[in-house]
């Protein structure tokens, strides 16, 4: 399947891309190369290949989600640049 310059213009319009006429031939060649590559992939026999869910066989090993206190208020406030005894102070953003 070959793509014409009119096809390239239509694709550019659908993708909301500005395509100057000077780039039409270059884009046409590029799209046609991709289509040739896709045809080559379609010709490969994959009937004996099982579908994959993931590319690797590695699994995620998740830990149990358990709540615990790791930083108390005083330690957390000590990390802030400007605090009072209870809160972090931040610049006012609403007037």
Image: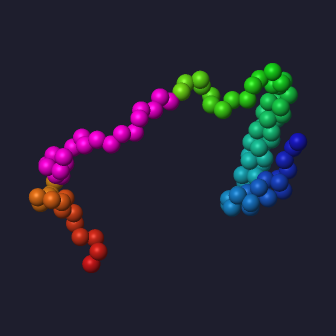
On the image, the x and y values in percent for residue 80 come to 18, 52
Which residue appears at 18% of the width and 60% of the height?
A: 87
Which residue appears at 22% of the width and 66% of the height?
A: 91
Look at the image and say whether residue 40 sits in the magenta stretch: no
Can you say whether 69 is above or below 44 in the image?
below
* Residues drawn in magenta: 60-80
On the image, the x and y values in percent for residue 12 come to 73, 57
Can you say whether 71 is above or below 95 in the image?
above
On the image, the x and y values in percent for residue 45 come to 84, 24
Can residue 79 be seen in this snapshot? Answer: no
Q: How many marks can you see? A: 0
Quadrant of the rendered structure where residue 32 is?
Answer: top right
The answer to which of 36 and 75 lies nearer the viewer is 75
In which quadrant of the rendered image does the C terminus lie?
Answer: bottom left
Which residue appears at 74% of the width and 42% of the height?
A: 30
Hey, which residue is sitting farthest bottom in the picture?
A: 95
Hey, which residue is sitting farthest top in the picture?
A: 48
The answer to which of 45 and 58 lies nearer the viewer is 58
Hey, which residue is sitting farthest left in the picture?
A: 85
Can residue 41 be seen in this snapshot? Answer: yes
Can you say whether 91 is above or below 52 in the image?
below
The answer to which of 81 and 76 lies nearer the viewer is 76
Quadrant of the rendered structure where residue 48 is?
Answer: top right
The answer to which of 73 and 17 lies nearer the viewer is 73
Hey, which residue is sitting farthest right in the picture?
A: 1
Instruction: Give the main secondary structure of the magenta stretch.
Output: loop
On the image, the x and y values in percent for residue 15 come to 70, 58
């Amino acid at each position: 399947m070959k793509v014409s310059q009119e096809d390239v213009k239509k694709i550019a319009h659908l993708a909301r891309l500005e395509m100057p006429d000077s780039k039409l031939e270059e884009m046409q060649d590029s799209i046609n190369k991709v289509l040739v590559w896709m045809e080559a992939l379609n010709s490969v026999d994959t009937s004996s290949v099982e579908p994959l869910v993931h590319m690797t066989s590695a699994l995620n090993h998740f830990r149990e989600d358990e709540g615990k206190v790791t930083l108390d208020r005083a330690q957390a406030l000590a990390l802030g640049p400007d605090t009072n005894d209870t809160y972090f102070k931040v610049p006012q953003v609403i007037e």
